[in-house]
Image: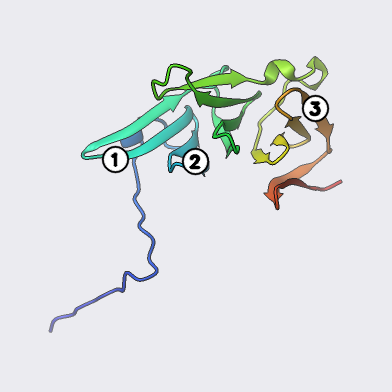
Amino acid sequence: SQFLFAQSERGMLPIQNFTPKEYRALPQNWGVSQSHNGVIYVGNNEGLIEYKGANGKDEKWSLYNVANGSNVRSISIDKNGFVFVGARDEIGYFAPDSMGRGKLIYYNLVDYVDNIHKPLGEIWHTVAVDDGVYFASFSKVYYWDYKELKTLDFGDINWLFSFNGKAHVVSAM
């Protein structure tokens, strides 16, 4: 006897998996975000992975490090296309180089944090909203308004997310 199985492609999303060998970084990935022009960014234990898609057989992968070389846990892309990241004791953003070479340059925001609030710990959530960017550890939220950085103490943070262009914190406080 013979069997024939069929599945309708209607409603099915195209999914493609990549191995660490293909993207040339460690296997553990954290946050994922996609820019307005389709570039995918992945937080990885080695840094920020950028995937610009396939061009024939050539995959366009790049790996970028944050200043202290730690893992990137969270990612959010703002309205200007800057890629904001949270890492271990590290917050900042990647922006295109000024020479137009297609590479990203990292801008560290840790120097804007008062010493009393260092070390930052793991930054598990990064959210870009209309008025700035929020980074959250387990106990503090760091808010960057593109000029200065403010630290907000929440005690015990469970989640940071955006809704209707505003940042919201879920806290046990």
Q: Distance between the Cα atoms at labels 1 and 3?
A: 40 Å
Q: Position of residue 64 (x, y in %)?
A: 46, 24
Q: Name the front one of labels 3 and 2.
A: 2
Mark 1 residue type: Ala
Disc 2 secondary structure class: loop
Q: Is residue 143 above or below residue 34?
A: above
Q: Distance between the Cα atoms at labels 3 and 2?
A: 26 Å
Mark 2 residue type: Ser
Q: Distance between the Cα atoms at labels 1 and 2?
A: 16 Å
* Residue name at image x 35 percent, y 34 percent: 23
The residue where tag 2 is placed is 35
Q: Quadrant of residue 89?
A: top right
Mark 1 vs 2: CB contact within 8 A: no
The answer to whether residue 129 is left or right of residue 22 is right
- Tell me which label, 3 or 2, sits earlier in the chain: 2
Q: Position of residue 146 (x, y in %)?
A: 70, 26
The residue lying furthest to the left in this view is: 1
In the picture, which quadrant includes the N terminus? Answer: bottom left
Q: Residues within 10 Å of mark 1 (few under 14, many from 20)?
A: few
Q: Is residue 131 above or below residue 116?
A: below
The residue where tag 3 is placed is 150
Mark 3 vs 2: CB contact within 8 A: no
* Residue name at image x 73 percent, y 18 percent: 112
Disc 3 secondary structure class: strand
- Tell me which label, 1 or 3, sits earlier in the chain: 1
The answer to whether residue 60 is left or right of residue 81 is left
Mark 3 residue type: Lys
The residue where tag 1 is placed is 54
Q: Is residue 12 above or below residue 88?
A: below
